[in-house]
Amino acid sequence: MRVVVLGVGNVLLSDEGLGVRAVERLQRINCLPPEVEVIDGGTSGMELLEQIEGIDALIMVDAIRAGAPPATPIRLAGEALPVFFRTRLSPHQVGLSDVLASLELLGRSPRHICILGLQPQSLALGMELSRAVEEGMPALLAMVTAELASLGLAAPAKSCGGS
Amino acid sequence: MSQRVTIDPVTRIEGHLRVDVEVDGGKVKKAWASGQMWRGVENILIGRDPRDAWAITQRICGVCTTVHALASVRSVENALQLELPVNAQYIRNMIILAHAVHDHIVHFYHLSALDWVDVTSALKADPAKAASLAESLSSWSGNSKAEFSKVQQRLSGFVGTGQLGIFTNGYWGHPAMKLPPEINLIAVAHYLQALEVQRHANKVVSILGGKTPHIQNVVVGGVANALAVDSQAVLTVERLLAVKDWIDQLADFVKNVYLVDVAVVGGSYPEWTQIGRGIVDYLCVPDIPLDGRNTEFALPGGHIAGGDLASFKQIRTHDDAYFKDGVSESVKHSWYEGGKGPLHPYKGETRPQYTDFQDDGKYSWLKSPTFYDKPMQVGPLPRVLAMVAAGHKPTIDYAAHALELVSTVAKTKVGIDALHSTIGRHAARAVACAVEVDELARQWDLLLASMAKGDLKTFNKPVFPQGEITGVGMHEAPRGVLSHWIVIRDGKIRNYQCVVPTTWNAAPRNERDEPGAYEACLAGTPVAIPDQPLEVLRTVHSFDPCLACAVHVVDQERQPVIRVKAA
């Protein structure tokens, strides 16, 4: 089994970068099994095609604007995912959704895709997370490890000395 | 009665580029380009160590990470007047060129081809006819009847299950779509093949840059790659041989597929050589340095006035005062505090002052850069024209070859003047890409030759003096001239400004109320159906707009992106 945990976002725009910050912390705090690859995707598009094609599961971590209170945890999967695709304006813009569309066309999409994230509070310029999102980060990391667990992969905290 | 069409966003979900056009009698009369997000990233840098600036600036943009990293280290090196080992230049040059080739391929096939290609029409094509047409134009191995049949079947299955929705808002059946089904099928097949080929360019960047999408090997003073003729841990001859193999495959695709496809599309839409001319004052800078002091270059650059190649004035070094003294930015129509007139980037200020969208006042987050007080067009078209004017033989040859192909398809003689247009920008990008992929191979040769002589040096240590120094990092990025301007005092950043290609092209009106390149090029563009402004997107996309990549927020609320109302 191959699983990619992909953090996306712009770390220069405070909470916009929460996905990247989350995967940095995931690597620091948790023991990850060899099946799991963690990628800091930044705001890239087509550069990521190679690394996510043909994998079993893609767990994206991103800021999600859902009109909810700041730091509300949000999980999009299955039926809710088309919403992610639909928000694109046109076929011309190569973003991550287009990479996934291209993989669909090639018949090499990840078999399972979900997007985990928090409602951002601030998208202002700055390299720090807002306080609300900072406080919500443990919940987001717990969602990521729970998602991995649902795929049969354990990612215990390093301090637990599991390995 | 005229109508006002607002396209917001033109680029991505968060809408960093908004374009408004006033349409009258089926044509654009007036246009406004507006950057919709504040990018005062420079303010984050003030007070930091100049050696860290490149790692932060490469996060400005998702597509152009490497270009900001390189422009940034060059600005610091220029301030220090620091000489680099040539090996560092060769490695950086290969990253620059591989990134450019990647960018151009992805731009044409995955960003803009669907402006011209009707995917659904490809289902009606005869694969045998498509194969004989493709084979008459190119020796590419992926042009067989079997290949085209396979692609058509895959596409048909895709459409049958209703999944075409992933290409939402494709303007299928729009009256401005004119390619015959066979050419549409060829283009769809090449779209898929381009997905495979673009990986090779990405691999070159990741091997040399240590990682992708964010490279890690750049340092002020050179690169962090340790070179070795034989070692497991570093950049060895064996790994460089793999790089060469990818370069060769890229070259095959660029010359035998990309360049040919652009010529076929161009030759099939001859009316688009007359649309989108706009600003013909062109600016580009020399790049691919061949010495440690940035005074000799593989690819020349300079300034062309009024579209006249005879007016070409060369920019000779990365310290050339003609460039350094000529750039300034106005905020008269931008959402920043102003009142001081246009400012040179060393003196540039970034203090936001938002108003509403005011047609005759402030309407964009982009500043308006000028070169000796005139708005410029930047990008592959200025680059190709400048290289032709400078007598760069490979560019002259590829440009002639491309125009010959276009003439064959159009069945009429098409000359270099056709390049000053919407479709001409695509042709120029393909010509630039062919030149760049050849130069990529040559830089590989230069690196290997240098290593063979026993030179493995890749880094010179920078020393920061007390007091104030200034520097500019010039880079001819895929989308055009990029310059980072830095003021360093006592080893810390005191001011920093990035003047990026899309700022030149998507600039709002300047101090003298003259339009920027997008705005000028859109004037006169036909619009058949105001709420399906495909023609406007064609002209905007021909520049390869790159504003939107900075933000990546999933938005669950769907918003209308095109609004039409009576003006």
Image (cartoon, rainbow, N blue to C red):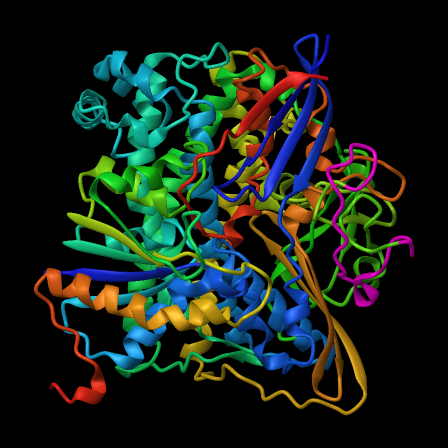
Q: Position of residue B47 (x, y in %)?
A: 69, 80
| Vertical relation: A118 (above or below) B135 | below
| Vertical relation: B195 (above or below) A73 | above
Magenta stretch, main secondary structure class? loop
Identify the residue at image location x=25%, y=69%: A142
Can I make out residue B155 in this image?
yes
Identify the residue at image location x=43%, y=20%: B171
Q: Position of residue B140 (x, y in %)?
A: 30, 34
| Vertical relation: B418 (above or below) A46 | above
Q: The C terminus of chain B appears in which quarter of the rendering? A: top right
Q: Is residue B353 magenta?
A: yes
| Vertical relation: B227 (above or below) B324 | below
Identify the residue at image location x=39%, y=46%: B251
A57 sits left or right of B11 in the view: left
- How many tags in the picture? 0
The quarter holding residue B131 reads top left
Q: Position of residue A155 (x, y in %)?
A: 17, 74
Q: Is residue B487 magenta?
A: no
The span shown in magenta is B339-362
B31 sits left or right of B245 in the view: right
| Nearer to us in this view, B224 or B90 | B224
Can I make out residue B215 in this image?
no
The quarter holding residue B509 reads top right
Q: The N terminus of chain B appears in which quarter of the rendering? A: top right
Identify the residue at image location x=67%, y=76%: B76
A109 sits left or right of A102 in the view: left
| Nearer to us in this view, A29 or B241 | A29
Q: Position of residue A69 (x, y in %)?
A: 44, 56
| Nearer to us in this view, B290 or B157 | B157
